[in-house]
Amino acid sequence: MDRTGAVSVTRIPADFDRWNDVLALIMRAFASMDGVIDPPSSAHLLTADTLRDKARREAGFVAFKGDRIVGCVFALEKVAELYVGKLAVAPDCQGQGIGRRLMQAVEDLARRRGKAALELQTRIELTGNHAAFARFGFHETERTAHEGYLRPTSITMRKVLA
């Protein structure tokens, strides 16, 4: 195991076999949202198999600290942008620049593919996310109410790539 604490970010390969580790990471990272966001996160619907299927449809990246998976992100290709989802960083590794490294990998991919922007959604209640994504260069573009809610529950944020 790497004792320097160095973090590496890599694209998830086709033969990737650590889906249970990625699932455990997402569940730990999203656990802090339980009881905070309304409607609740869909993370509890994930399985190792649904993540594997997601990676077949979307570009995925994982962050490693030694051999431990400490972060992940997925990006769905749309016509003009990449849609960023399931950005997760291990709770004990937050504040170490791992999210920024993962977002940079997605941005680099978007630029290579000639995309004009990155887009994502976050929940209104997660004000820390709004601030973090603003530091990554994202700006709010829309507030959306989920089915059955009279008030907005999520915020769409966009980063235009120059």
Image (cartoon, rainbow, N blue to C red):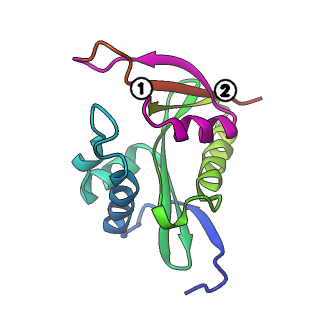
Q: Position of residue 116 (x, y in %)?
A: 66, 26
* Residue 96 figure quarter: bottom right
Location of the N terminus (image quadrant): bottom right
Check disc 1 and report its element: helix, strand or loop: strand
Check contact, mark 2 vs mark 1: CB within 8 A: no
Q: Position of residue 11 (x, y in %)?
A: 54, 58
Eyeballing the image, is 131 above or below 11?
above
Eyeballing the image, is 47 above or below 103?
below
Q: Nearer the viewer, mark 2 or mark 1?
A: 1
Q: Position of residue 135 (x, y in %)?
A: 69, 39
* Residue 20 figure quarter: bottom left
Give left or right: position of 121 versus 96: left
Within-10-Å neighbours for mark 2: few <14, some 14–19, many 20+: some
Q: For the point 61% across and 37% down, which residue is it?
A: 131
Check disc 2 and report its element: helix, strand or loop: loop
Residue 154 numbered tag: 1
Give left or right: position of 3 versus 48: right
| Residue underneath mark 2 | 116
The three-letter amino acid code for the residue at tag 2 is Ala
Task: Report the residue that reaches farthest toward the top.
Answer: 150
Eyeballing the image, is 62 above or below 144?
below
Q: For the point 46% across and 17% down, which residue is it?
A: 143
Q: Is residue 90 visible?
A: no
Q: Earlier in the sequence, mark 2 or mark 1?
A: 2
Q: Which region of the structure is painted magenta? A: 124-148
Q: Position of residue 125 (x, y in %)?
A: 42, 33
Within-10-Å neighbours for mark 1: few <14, some 14–19, many 20+: many
* Residue 27 figure quarter: bottom left
The three-letter amino acid code for the residue at tag 1 is Ser
